[in-house]
């Protein structure tokens, strides 16, 4: 305790009274000040969101004064730094969507299988080891995964398919998928474990095996939670940067073929940031327009994921 | 559904379904094994390429055009300094916000907005934080491409992690502790300062470590604010011989960090630089793994020891 209330034994009674009153007043004041400070700290998150939206929109507005929105959405070339400048976000979006599709094709089956296994099949000891391990896998920096994709996975893929270029969406997508597995697995597993035990017991009592119970009872019951895990996985894949910047090349390329190199929205932002673009130029503004596209996409995913998760929480 | 005719048929049916059970259990293990194998391949590959380069010189040399003389001195010093700034901002802000939301916040729309914001921020791609920092810290506030800008950016990035860890930790403190403290006449802040924060400190520490492990490996936002990839000097030293002995010039210094150094080496065509990248990556992986493992261990200890 920092302060002792007015020392009654030493001071005359009247003084003690006023001392205690002023102590009370200062204590209330201090409480108010501290509450305000804590409130301001909590408000930082709101300020951050407002600042993100403000910065992205401010620069994008200038960008869209130069480039009509229709052209941004329909042009099939992305050459913002050339004399003959074209700004077709589709080109970057195709790279983002293709690599994300590859990643999800890896992460969804593997992540779901792991989740079902951990929640319904695995003995306690396996789960105790596997969960922290998955957490470690999710904690590896993405630049490390990028290095791994470029210098380990791509050579292996080239061994099977020699025409594969050194930069390609396939190996970046595969590694990205492995990176996302922990997220998909842990959120899906949480959803499955939230399914009440009675449902399983009912199923077992009817003579169903573990597999039948898992597939026909637990997974449908946890479906909205599992779906929200997939959606959060998509938003991770779309926002992933370094794996793609390292392993997929930075050439804008309108393609849906994962065997080709292509730039994604995020890789383009990195590429521009590495160069030395003057503040306020149109090239500088393109990365904010690209970032706004990215933010809107991931925001939509996140909202859909939260809505789904809410509905699964209220199911029981 | 067809009914089984006799016992033999029922036995066959059961055996078939049991087999399917075993098959799926194996499939699950195999899927887990994919993760394990990838992780092992990644680690071993990096160790084989990188460990021969890991000499004392590698840690004490500046980057160089000649791969055999290049080192990661400016990168690891930069990483440490940026982490210092990040922790300085993220820990007090995150803990304060967590305490506010658990112990103070009234149930109203402002609190709802704050909570929705925190969950949403956790899902924003890290490169968007980089754009925020580029527009706001670097140009609007004029902080430039400095250690301070990078530290602030990463602090905002890991703030949701710290806040969520703080809240979970506080929530696990039984109500009786609060009631006891209030009954003795403690004010809200006294209860928080003397009871809530100390009792939740281990859980908060876990969250902070996980957040810092994430921040130290983040590349994209730091590249976006324009960290340089080639830095052949150290920021000014924080300690000085003459009064006032402390100097904060380093926070405004240009810098590089470990992941950027690794990115730079990875994107060069020469194989010798790839070896350097592997060595830098090995150091980085060891650092993040050690931090994550520490956090997991702390959480495990916590779960075992605390019984209210």
Image (cartoon, coloured by chain):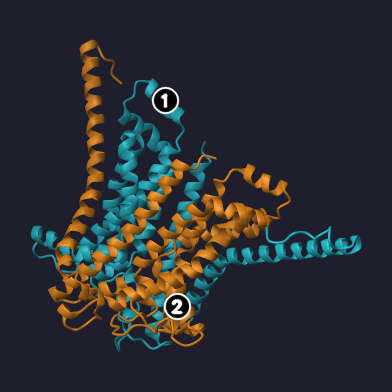
Chain colours: A cyan, B orange
- Image quadrant containing the C terminus of chain B: top right
- Residue A294 rendering spot, x and y as whole percentages: 40, 67
Residue located farthest toward the top when viewing the structure as drawn: B6
- Image quadrant containing the N terminus of chain B: top left
**Secondary structure beneath disc 1?**
helix
Residue located farthest toward the front when viewing the structure as drawn: A10
Q: Height in image: A178 above or below A128?
A: below
Residue A285 shows in the view: yes
**Secondary structure beneath disc 2?**
helix
Q: Which residue in the protein does label 1 denote?
A: A201
Residue drawn 45% across and 66% down?
Answer: B157
- Residue A33 rendering spot, x and y as whole percentages: 69, 66
B13 left or right of A308 in image: left
Residue drawn 46% across and 57% down?
Answer: B205
Residue drawn 19% across and 72% down?
Answer: B276
Q: Chain of mark 2?
A: B
Q: Which residue in the protein does label 2 denote?
A: B149
Q: Height in image: A157 above or below A60?
A: above
Residue drawn 25% across and 20% down?
Answer: B14
Q: Are marks 1 and 2 in contact (CB under 8 Å)?
A: no
B279 left or right of A96 in image: left
Residue located farthest toward the right when viewing the structure as drawn: A14
Q: Chain of mark 1?
A: A
Alpha carbon of mark 1 to alpha carbon of mark 2: how far?
Answer: 55 Å
- Residue A53 rendering spot, x and y as whole percentages: 51, 71
Residue A261 shows in the view: no
Q: Height in image: B231 above or below B85?
A: below
Circle 2 Cα neighbour tier, 10 Å, few/some/many (<14 / 14–19 / ≥20): many
């Amino acid at each position: 305790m920092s302060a002792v209330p007015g020392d009654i034994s030493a001071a005359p009674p009247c003084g003690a009274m006023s001392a205690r009153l002023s102590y009370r007043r200062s204590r209330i004041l201090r409480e108010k000040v501290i509450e305000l400070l804590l409130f301001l700290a909590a408000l930082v998150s709101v300020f951050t969101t407002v600042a993100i939206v403000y910065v992205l929109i401010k620069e994008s507005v200038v960008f869209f004064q130069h480039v009509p929105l229709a052209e941004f959405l329909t042009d099939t070339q992305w050459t913002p730094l050339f004399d003959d400048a074209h700004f077709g976000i589709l080109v970057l979006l195709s790279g983002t969507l293709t690599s994300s599709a590859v990643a999800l094709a890896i992460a969804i089956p593997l992540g779901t299988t792991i989740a079902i296994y951990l929640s319904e099949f695995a003995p306690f000891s396996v789960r105790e080891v596997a969960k922290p391990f998955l957490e470690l896998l999710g904690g590896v920096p993405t630049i490390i995964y990028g290095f791994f994709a470029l210098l380990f996975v791509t050579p292996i893929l080239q061994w099977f398919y020699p025409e594969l270029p050194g930069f390609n969406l396939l190996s970046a997508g595969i590694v990205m998928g492995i990176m996302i597995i922990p997220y998909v697995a842990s959120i899906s597993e949480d959803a499955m474990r939230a399914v009440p035990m009675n449902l399983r017991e009912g199923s077992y009592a009817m003579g169903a095996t573990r597999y039948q119970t898992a597939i026909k009872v637990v997974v449908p019951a946890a479906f909205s939670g599992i779906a929200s895990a997939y959606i959060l996985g998509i938003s991770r894949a779309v926002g992933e940067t370094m794996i793609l910047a390292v392993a997929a090349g930075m050439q804008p390329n309108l393609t849906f073929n994962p065997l080709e190199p292509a730039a994604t929205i995020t890789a383009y932002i990195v590429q521009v940031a590495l160069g030395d673009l003057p503040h306020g130029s149109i090239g500088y503004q393109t990365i904010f327009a690209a970032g706004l596209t990215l933010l809107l996409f991931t925001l939509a995913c996140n909202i859909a994921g939260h809505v789904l998760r809410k509905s699964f929480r209220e199911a029981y | 559904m067809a009914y089984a005719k006799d016992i033999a048929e029922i036995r066959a049916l059961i055996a078939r379904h049991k087999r399917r059970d075993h098959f799926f259990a194996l499939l699950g293990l195999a899927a887990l094994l994919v993760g394990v194998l990838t992780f092992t391949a990644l680690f071993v590959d990096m160790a084989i390429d990188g460990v021969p380069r890991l000499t004392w010189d590698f840690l004490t040399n500046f980057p160089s055009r000649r791969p055999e003389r290049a080192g990661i001195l400016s990168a690891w010093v930069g990483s440490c300094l940026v982490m210092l700034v990040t922790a300085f901002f993220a820990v007090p802000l995150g803990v304060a916000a967590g305490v506010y939301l658990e112990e103070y916040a009234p149930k109203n729309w402002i609190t709802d907005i704050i909570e929705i914001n925190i969950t949403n921020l956790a899902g924003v791609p890290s490169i968007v934080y980089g754009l925020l920092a580029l527009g706001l810290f670097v140009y609007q506030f004029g902080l430039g491409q400095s250690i301070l800008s990078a530290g602030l950016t990463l602090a905002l990035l890991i703030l949701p992690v710290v806040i969520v860890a703080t809240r979970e930790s506080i929530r696990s403190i039984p109500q009786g502790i609060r009631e006891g403290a209030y009954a003795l006449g403690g004010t809200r802040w006294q209860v928080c300062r003397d009871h809530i924060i100390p009792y939740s400190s281990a859980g908060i520490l876990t969250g902070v470590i996980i957040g810092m492990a994430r921040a130290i490996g983040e590349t994209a936002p730091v590249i976006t604010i324009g960290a340089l990839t080639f830095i052949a000097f150290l920021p000014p030293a924080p300690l000085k011989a003459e009064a006032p002995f402390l100097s904060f010039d380093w926070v405004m210094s240009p810098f590089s960090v470990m992941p950027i150094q690794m990115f730079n080496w990875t994107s060069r065509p020469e194989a010798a630089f790839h070896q350097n990248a592997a060595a830098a990556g090995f150091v980085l992986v060891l650092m993040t793994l050690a931090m994550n493992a520490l956090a997991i261990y702390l959480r495990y200890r916590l779960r075992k020891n605390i019984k209210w």
